[in-house]
Protein backbone atom coordinates (compact mmCIF):
# COMPACT_ATOMS: atom_id res chain seq x y z
CA UNK A 1 0.00 0.00 0.00
CA UNK A 2 1.13 3.50 -0.78
CA UNK A 3 -0.10 6.83 0.49
CA UNK A 4 -1.27 9.06 -2.35
CA UNK A 5 -2.34 12.61 -3.04
CA UNK A 6 -5.26 13.09 -5.43
CA UNK A 7 -7.04 15.81 -7.38
CA UNK A 8 -8.51 18.71 -5.46
CA UNK A 9 -12.19 19.70 -5.75
CA UNK A 10 -13.04 20.33 -9.38
CA UNK A 11 -9.92 18.51 -10.61
CA UNK A 12 -10.44 14.97 -9.37
CA UNK A 13 -10.14 12.36 -12.11
CA UNK A 14 -11.58 8.90 -12.08
CA UNK A 15 -11.85 6.25 -14.74
CA UNK A 16 -9.97 3.46 -16.45
CA UNK A 17 -6.69 3.72 -18.28
CA UNK A 18 -3.51 1.79 -18.97
CA UNK A 19 0.09 2.68 -18.26
CA UNK A 20 1.22 3.70 -21.73
CA UNK A 21 4.64 5.06 -20.89
CA UNK A 22 7.06 5.31 -17.96
CA UNK A 23 9.83 7.84 -17.34
CA UNK A 24 12.62 8.27 -14.80
CA UNK A 25 13.14 11.89 -13.72
CA UNK A 26 10.49 12.98 -16.24
CA UNK A 27 10.28 16.34 -17.94
CA UNK A 28 7.07 18.14 -16.94
CA UNK A 29 5.06 20.00 -19.55
CA UNK A 30 1.94 21.51 -18.00
CA UNK A 31 -1.30 21.04 -19.94
CA UNK A 32 -2.64 24.09 -21.75
CA UNK A 33 -5.55 24.43 -19.29
CA UNK A 34 -3.09 24.60 -16.38
CA UNK A 35 -0.92 27.17 -18.14
CA UNK A 36 -4.01 29.35 -18.62
CA UNK A 37 -4.99 29.32 -14.94
CA UNK A 38 -1.65 29.06 -13.10
CA UNK A 39 1.15 31.62 -13.35
CA UNK A 40 3.73 29.14 -12.00
CA UNK A 41 2.80 26.60 -14.69
CA UNK A 42 3.00 29.38 -17.29
CA UNK A 43 6.72 29.70 -16.51
CA UNK A 44 7.16 26.13 -17.70
CA UNK A 45 5.01 26.21 -20.83
CA UNK A 46 7.96 24.77 -22.81
CA UNK A 47 8.72 22.16 -20.16
CA UNK A 48 10.45 21.82 -16.80
CA UNK A 49 13.54 19.59 -16.92
CA UNK A 50 13.54 16.44 -14.83
CA UNK A 51 15.23 16.56 -11.45
CA UNK A 52 14.56 17.03 -7.74
CA UNK A 53 12.66 20.32 -8.26
CA UNK A 54 10.39 18.95 -10.97
CA UNK A 55 6.68 18.64 -9.99
CA UNK A 56 6.53 15.06 -11.35
CA UNK A 57 9.21 13.94 -8.93
CA UNK A 58 11.49 10.96 -9.44
CA UNK A 59 9.29 8.79 -11.69
CA UNK A 60 6.07 9.02 -13.69
CA UNK A 61 3.60 6.55 -15.15
CA UNK A 62 1.66 8.08 -18.05
CA UNK A 63 -2.00 7.07 -18.27
CA UNK A 64 -3.58 6.38 -21.66
CA UNK A 65 -7.19 5.59 -22.60
CA UNK A 66 -8.33 4.42 -26.03
CA UNK A 67 -4.77 4.86 -27.29
CA UNK A 68 -4.59 8.55 -26.31
CA UNK A 69 -2.68 10.26 -23.51
CA UNK A 70 -5.15 11.29 -20.79
CA UNK A 71 -2.63 13.90 -19.52
CA UNK A 72 -2.99 12.29 -16.08
CA UNK A 73 -0.02 10.70 -14.37
CA UNK A 74 0.88 8.61 -11.38
CA UNK A 75 4.06 10.33 -10.25
CA UNK A 76 6.34 11.29 -7.43
CA UNK A 77 6.29 14.62 -5.67
CA UNK A 78 8.82 17.08 -4.34
CA UNK A 79 6.19 18.14 -1.77
CA UNK A 80 5.74 15.20 0.63
CA UNK A 81 3.15 17.18 2.63
CA UNK A 82 0.75 16.84 -0.33
CA UNK A 83 0.53 13.05 0.05
CA UNK A 84 -2.68 12.11 1.81
CA UNK A 85 -4.50 15.20 0.56
CA UNK A 86 -6.67 16.29 -2.35
CA UNK A 87 -4.40 18.99 -3.79
CA UNK A 88 -3.32 18.10 -7.33
CA UNK A 89 -4.75 19.05 -10.72
CA UNK A 90 -5.95 15.47 -11.09
CA UNK A 91 -2.78 13.39 -11.04
CA UNK A 92 -2.07 10.74 -8.42
CA UNK A 93 1.10 11.53 -6.48
CA UNK A 94 3.26 9.39 -4.22
CA UNK A 95 6.37 10.02 -2.19
CA UNK A 96 9.44 9.85 -4.42
CA UNK A 97 10.74 6.74 -2.65
CA UNK A 98 7.35 5.04 -3.11
CA UNK A 99 7.00 5.89 -6.81
CA UNK A 100 10.55 4.63 -7.41
CA UNK A 101 9.55 1.24 -5.99
CA UNK A 102 6.11 1.25 -7.68
CA UNK A 103 7.73 2.19 -11.02
CA UNK A 104 9.75 -1.04 -10.96
CA UNK A 105 6.68 -3.16 -10.20
CA UNK A 106 4.35 -1.77 -12.89
CA UNK A 107 4.70 -2.78 -16.53
CA UNK A 108 3.64 -0.90 -19.67
CA UNK A 109 0.06 -1.95 -20.44
CA UNK A 110 -0.95 -2.38 -16.79
CA UNK A 111 -4.61 -1.52 -16.29
CA UNK A 112 -5.36 1.34 -13.91
CA UNK A 113 -8.73 2.08 -12.38
CA UNK A 114 -9.20 5.23 -10.32
CA UNK A 115 -12.38 5.34 -8.22
Image (cartoon, rainbow, N blue to C red):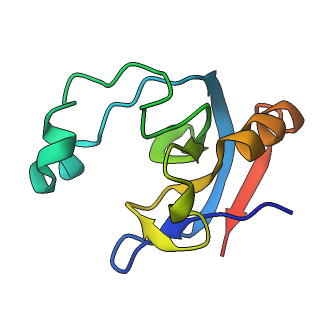
Q: Is residue 88 left or right of residue 61?
A: left
Q: Residue at x 18, y 44 (%)?
A: 40
Q: Is residue 49 above or below residue 85?
A: above
Q: Which quadrant is the C terminus positioned in?
A: bottom right
Nearest the eye: 6 or 108: 6
Q: Quadrant of residue 105?
A: top right
Q: Is residue 18 above or below residue 8?
A: above
Q: Is residue 101 visible?
A: yes
Position of residue 75 measured from the top left corner of the image (x, y, whole percent): 59, 44
Q: Is residue 27 left or right of residue 103?
A: left
Q: Residue at x 51, y 63 (%)?
A: 82
Q: From this viewpoint, which residue is outermost toward the bottom?
A: 9
Q: Which quadrant is the N terminus positioned in?
A: bottom right
Q: Is residue 79 above or below residue 45?
A: below
Q: Residue at x 65, y 28 (%)?
A: 22
Position of residue 103 measured from the top left corner of the image (x, y, whole percent): 77, 35
Q: Residue at x 53, y 67 (%)?
A: 6
Q: Number of labelled discs?
A: 0
Nearest the eye: 22 or 54: 54
Q: Is residue 99 above or below residue 20?
A: below
Q: Is residue 66 visible?
A: no
Position of residue 107 measured from the top left corner of the image (x, y, whole percent): 83, 33
Amino acid sequence: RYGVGVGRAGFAWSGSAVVGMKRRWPRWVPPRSMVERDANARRWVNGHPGGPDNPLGARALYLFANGADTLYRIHGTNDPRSVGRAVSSGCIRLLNEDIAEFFELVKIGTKVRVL
